[in-house]
Image (cartoon, rainbow, N blue to C red):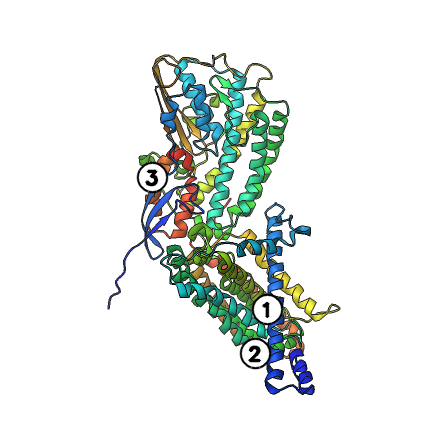
Amino acid sequence: MSVKTEPFYLNIGPQHPSTHGVLRLRVTLDGEVIVDVEPVIGYLHRGIEKLAEGRTYAQNIPFTDRLDYLAAMTNNVAYCMAVEKLAGIKVPERGEYLRVIFSELMRIASHLMAVGFFLNDIGAMMTPVLYMWREREKILDMFEMACGQRMMYNYMRIGGMSQDVPEEFLPAVKKFIAEMPRYIDEYDQLLAQNEILLARSKGVGILPRETAVSIGASGPVLRASGVKWDLRKMDPYSIYDRFDFEVPTGQTGDCYDRYWVRMQEMRQSVRIVEQALKQLPGKGSVCADVPQFFRAPKGEAYVCIEAPKGNLGFYVVSDGSIAPYRLHIYPPTLINITAMKDMAVGWKIADLIIIFGSIDVVLGEIDR
Amino acid sequence: MTLLDEFQLFLKTLGWPDWAYYSVPALTGIVIIVAAVLTIVIVFIWWERRLLGRFQIRLGPNRCGPEGIFQPIATAVKILLKEDIVPAKADKVVHFIAPIAVFVPVLMVFAVIPFDKAAILVDLNVGAIYIIAISSLSMLAIFMAAWASCNKYSLIAGLRAIAQMVSYELPVVMSLVGVAMMASSLSMVKIVEAQTLPFILLQPLGCLIFFLGSLAEMNRCPFDLLEADSEIVAGYHTEYSGMKFALFYLGEYGVAFVYAAVITTLFLSGWQGPFLPPVLWFLIKVFLVFTLILWMRATLPRLRVDQLMTFAWKFMLPMSLINLIVVAIEILLVPASLQWVMIVINFGLAAVLILLFSRMFTFGGGRVEV
């Protein structure tokens, strides 16, 4: 007698503890094994691209905070760089350096969240997250010193940033940079060879090099698959050509490699901030002279930078008025989650969750 | 002669009718046990939340009363006031019975747990078997809850529960047999009395296996697949709210108390100890075991369902069989005066076996050099 079985359909999300927001995964299961998975997105769509057409260039900066809200500063930078490219504005030296410092601190904060919640998805009940928040809090405190905000910074301006950093900011950064490598060592000690972490993530959710390249993945997801692609090295925007750092890559492209790449990138970011602090000009303006209601010349500009989650692009079209004619955002995680099915089919539900966690998804960015 | 027997004899001298002198002491004992268990469970909940806070570099509850000691009571009041929601397509009867069926076995087990030589409800001569039989019942109740909820997450949790119980019951029973052989009795009181040296020293491997197995039985980290909140929301109690949920919650801590008490009795020489009163010794040991469980929860990630099975069948079962055989041979050959020989042999054996296993076997992930 043969047993008749039928597939089991399961909607994971949009209300689920580990969908990192409001993503819905339509999963077909055979027992616990995943047969098919399809991400359903759009629950957090706010029409930011359309809204941007009705607001001035400067008024759009707060919108960019709400894309990848765990790395809002980087979004600010990317948008401002696109507009600056369009209008041909040159950012003062000190402004560029501060932007680099802020971007790299943001990268550390974002990766801390990513790794913490990845471990939370594996099932280490909140402990790693709270340990990683210990460091993230320090970064947020520094940002609060600079702009009075902890999440939606709205700090960057077209041509630089809204104000110079207060005097207590730089010593705080120096102190943080001095102690951060020790904390990363502590995490490595606790996690890197943890038997259960290895069992759960090594060899799980492999994204082959070719697939990663062909879907256009970027950021740690791509680098974990062994592709040495980092826009800070490949196309050094801003002043990244002045710093000495490495691009860590994984070998197999499994969940463990994605975790490992993030840990290494934090070390590299610390190095970059260290160098930037040394080279930072002591005095000078942090913002170019740009009128409040400035009109960008007719034309278009596209800027793509290395955000914590991958290549973040802003495409701005101007018709010569005070507002952009069209703003398009190229979000890295939207591209990265298209690899979900390639990675997850054949694994179990528990693996689906950690594969998902290892991509490091922020829905604000995907749905816009 | 337990305290209840004495109470019974006392009532007999007063000339009470037969039914009264039998049932009054029994009811008294039950009320005392229920009250004691619930009180200790509440202390456990507070201890867990407070200590977990410390593990996670935060304070934990500290607003309700000194050191947040009344927080579990505040939680209980909040839960009681919540609306009881039953899913429209749920099997209403089973959905209603399941929380009760989870909690009752937990209380039943305490009938044979000796808090002291005399402080035991009934000293069954098959106490150990009774514990294994009754504590497995709560898995059935979990499956009832999972099935009746008519929720897909719950159903997955229910199926995981059955698989987990089948796998982990065996090594637990096997390591218990070692204890029973050494004590040459299944009565919990006799097992404690046989431990002039705690059995954790005489058979460390058996103790380890029993501890890990009981972690799986009580769904604690790293075996908490039934309520793996990052995967299947809340597992079998996803569709429960209000007092029904509270019963699951209490049952969970109750089971933790049960296994902590059983481990204390079987391996940590129960109430025995110098200076302090026996009941206090018992509770101290139970708290130590519970703290260890907590520590695991604060530290370890969760295993996957197939790794869980692998761990049971490829590690725990063979180990418990080896432990059983070695203990049997030792009982036969080693005279009682040379117990230190046994301690040395068993610790050496446990270390060698675990080392060998960890070298030869991985969960599939493999190791990395950092």
Q: Are marks 3 and 2 on the same chain?
A: no
Q: Nearer the viewer, residue B305 or B16?
A: B16
Kindly identify which residue carries mark 1.
B34
Mark 3: amino acid: Thr
The CA span between labels 2 and 1 is: 24 Å
Identify the element where label 1 is drawn: helix
Badge 1 density bin: few <14, some 14–19, many ≥20, Cα 10 Å = some
Q: Nearer the viewer, residue A57 or A216?
A: A57
Identify the element where label 3 is drawn: loop
| Image height of A143 relative to A259, above or below | above
- Residue B11 position, x and y percent, is 67, 83
Asked whether residue B238 appears in the rendered view, the answer is yes
Badge 3 density bin: few <14, some 14–19, many ≥20, Cα 10 Å = some
Badge 2 density bin: few <14, some 14–19, many ≥20, Cα 10 Å = many
Q: Nearer the viewer, residue B327 or B226?
A: B226
Q: Disc 3 sits on a residue from what chain?
A: A
Asked whether residue B199 appears in the rendered view, the answer is no
The CA span between labels 1 and 3 is: 55 Å
Residue B127's disc is none
Mark 1: amino acid: Val
Kindly identify which residue carries mark 2.
B186
Disc nearest the viewer among 2 and 1: 1
- Residue B235 position, x and y percent, is 44, 56
Q: Disc 2 sits on a residue from what chain?
A: B
| Image height of B42 relative to B121, above or below | above
Mark 2: amino acid: Leu
Q: Disc 1 sits on a residue from what chain?
A: B
Residue A338's disc is 3
